Image (cartoon, rainbow, N blue to C red):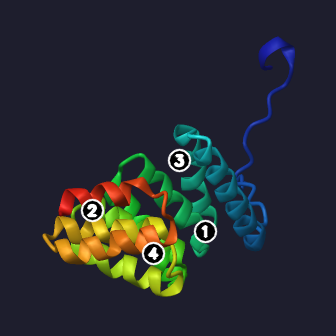
Amino acid sequence: MGLLGYPTVGPVHGQAALPLVPDLNFANLEERGIALARDAAQLAQFQQLDMALPRARLAVQLAPKAYQAHAVLGSIHLRREEFDPAIAALTTANRLQPDNAGVLFSLGSAYLRRQRYDLAVQSLQRGLRLRPNEATAIFDLGNVYFLQGRGEAAIAEYRRVLGIDKNFWAATNNIGLVE
């Protein structure tokens, strides 16, 4: 007799307990990962980076072949000034979607902040071939040239920015710094 007077049943020899393994729908996981990446992007847009980061990490795990998940993760790391993880995630996003100007601009910005100027120029120029009138990317390219000591090239890019957006005060300011 066992506890409380109930009979006990001993183990049956040769019996094994198998874990429950649910059937996984991998297409559904990718959809959920992409949706999670969108949620993370929205949180990041409202400066909720601490809440966005774990969602973006999970999105990458659920949708490892979706460039969007890697791009969102990279942009969050970039905004948190975590440049090496940003570069890693954005490089993966670029490998998955090579002709995405936004990914290339973010990657160029990360390389600029990491002082890897040649790679920054390559990424920014590739992105600008796809979207030639992106003032912020042109400004970043001007900054790379300035930091490389290429003043005339920097001024040319800053003037190009002002041709697109005459109120881009940082370009005007940087022309004054270079001259």
Sequence order check: which comes first, mark 3 or mark 4?
Answer: 3
Task: Give me the C-alpha separation between circle 3 and circle 2.
Answer: 36 Å
Q: What residue type is labelled 4?
A: Leu
Sequence order check: which comes first, mark 2 or mark 4?
Answer: 4
Residue that label 4 marks: 104
Residue that label 1 marks: 68
Q: Whole-percent x and y of residue 140? A: 35, 66
Q: Whole-percent x and y of residue 127? A: 46, 80
Sequence order check: which comes first, mark 1 or mark 3?
Answer: 3
* Local secondary structure at mark 1: helix
Taking the spot 30% from the left edge, 69% from the top edge, the residue there is 142
Task: Give me the C-alpha separation between circle 2 and circle 4.
Answer: 25 Å
Sequence order check: which comes first, mark 3 or mark 2?
Answer: 3
Residue that label 3 marks: 53
Task: Give me the C-alpha separation between circle 4 and circle 1.
Answer: 13 Å
Labelled pair 2, 4 in contact (Cβ < 8 Å) = no
> Mark number for residue 175?
2
Q: Which amino acid does label 3 sit on?
A: Leu
Measured along the vertical axis of the image, is residue 46 above or below residue 148? above
Give the crowd class for mark 4: few <14, some 14-19, many >=20 residues within 10 Å: many
